[in-house]
Image (tube, rainbow, N blue to C red):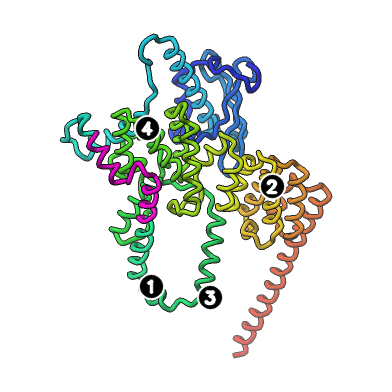
Amino acid sequence: MNGGNEDINEIPRLNDHYVDLFEQRILDRGSAYFAAGKVHAPRMIAPGLWHAAVFGSAESVYEVDVRLRYGTVVSAACTCPYAQRSAFCKHMAAVLLAMDDMRRRSDRARRNDDSDSMPVDDGFPWDASMAVRWYVRAQFPQVPKLTDDDWEAVKRIFEALFCLPDLDKTFMSEEMRLLYERTFFRGQDDDQAGGQADRKDRSAPDDARERRRLYAQMQNDYEPRHETLTQQHESRYRAGARGAMGRTGHGSASLDNMRLLVPFVTPCHLDELPHTWMTILEAAYEHLHDAVGLRRLYVYYIAIAQTDPEAVYVQKLRDLSGEHWQEDRDAIVAFMQRHRFGGRGEAPTNPAYERLLREDGLSDEAWDYCRIKSRDILIRMLDVVALKESNAVRALRYVESVLGDPDSPVFEQNTESGAQRVARWIRKVDLVYGYEQAKTLAEQACDMFPRRQLLREALADYLDAEQADDDADVGADVAADATDAAGVTDAEDATDEGEEEANEQGM
């Protein structure tokens, strides 16, 4: 096998016991990474040795090597910090799951090619049907199995409820529902706190400060959510019924919506279904083998995605669409452009749409998506935006303006996490535009903040040795100043205590 021209049929059939190498929580996280499309196609670089790159959190990219013998994992290695102290990490799990999936797809395609009759496995989705089946068993154990006519009725009812097939109307109804939740439940909280009078007395300058605060909050919010948009609606409804805004203690939130990925996890409540009521419609489409309706629903899921696991719908739609993929992809892009300023809940990012843009190399669409989001979204998608030269120039100009502004939200926090955030920007510039460009921006940032030792440490790879020594001297001076200040304070305190003691003795 040569480099990127790997033959998928050469992937060995993995021994199913590879899953036993991982703790369940590690395997679950690896499943989420694989389903979110964060694994670059594994390739064999030597006999029995497989390599893949995995996009980790905080824009990191980790290199994974897996050695196999007769389908059994002999050894594995990863460049992530966790793998330095533990035998198996989530990135290794994601790569093995990707290899297993590639082999299964290859086997299914070969069986279908060799069959003269109907396909052995048409690959039609069934995940929603299984989830709904378990939900119905838990909530309505006496209900008999639905017939085809029953599923047709379910389909008609829910299509009318969600304004389908017009996805624009579906989206607008969700936006109106969100607006209601924001105003009604927030008003309920304000009433309980006596907030109505405060709102009436609020002055114009306060409004301006609030707008600035919200803008800064948006710029510093660039991570995916842990609930889908429809789960979020259900959570707020339940929270509102209890007289509180939001629900942080929900037990299933810690699963990161794993029900999209692990069918044998059995949902017992409506908001444990990936898209609540819509999942029931999805199950109807699956039961009736309605590919057109299911494709339309996947298009909508991708457009409103706000959690990492929802990126799985890109591959599900690609598999289901077949020759209609270009048509469905264009429908998603057009939908996103029509509703680019829509709220889409409160999520700052859409992992599913980002996966689509990355896998299909859509530079213009990526630029359009990034420029109305947080600055950090642009950094995450910078390599995709830069695929087109004109966009690469515009993006670099924008990055330079942000990193050249000392008042930028990127420099707000003089903390370890704040320094690492700047370092992520610089590393991505290095990856896309080269080391010299990244070095120039790193030096400029250190010149703007000469006393930020944490920032210098984070950018040490881009600073000359001489400048690093100067930075160390500056750090020492800062520490000395702090020590001197502390000494003066201690001496003053001692003097004050002595005077107070003398006064007390004199009295």
Work out whether residue 169 or residue 477 is closer to the camera in this orientation and state it: 169
Disc 2 marks which amino acid? Answer: Ile
Mark 2 and mark 3: span between their CA atoms? 36 Å
Note whether 42 is above or below 407 in the view shown: above
Q: Is residue 446 left or right of residue 116?
A: right
Q: Are marks 2 and 3 in contact (CB under 8 Å)?
A: no
Residue 113 is situated, as x and y percent measured from the top left of the image, at 45, 12
Q: How busy is the neighbourhood of tag 1: few (under 14 within 10 Å), some, or many (20 plus)?
A: some
According to the picture, the residue beneath numbered tag 4 turns out to be: 292
Q: Earlier in the sequence, mark 2 or mark 3?
A: 3
Work out whether residue 70 or residue 161 is closer to the camera in this orientation and state it: 161
Note whether 50 is above or below 183 in the view shown: above
Disc 3 marks which amino acid? Answer: Pro
Q: Which mark is residue 195?
A: 1
Mark 3 and mark 1: span between their CA atoms? 18 Å
Q: Earlier in the sequence, mark 2 or mark 4?
A: 4
Mark 2 and mark 4: span between their CA atoms? 44 Å
According to the picture, the residue beneath numbered tag 3 turns out to be: 205
- Viewer-nearest of discs 2 and 4: 4
Residue drawn at 46 percent across, 13 percent down = 110
Disc 1 marks which amino acid? Answer: Gly
Q: Earlier in the sequence, mark 3 or mark 4?
A: 3
Q: How busy is the neighbourhood of tag 4: few (under 14 within 10 Å), some, or many (20 plus)?
A: few
Residue drawn at 26 percent across, 39 percent down = 156
Q: Earlier in the sequence, mark 2 or mark 1?
A: 1
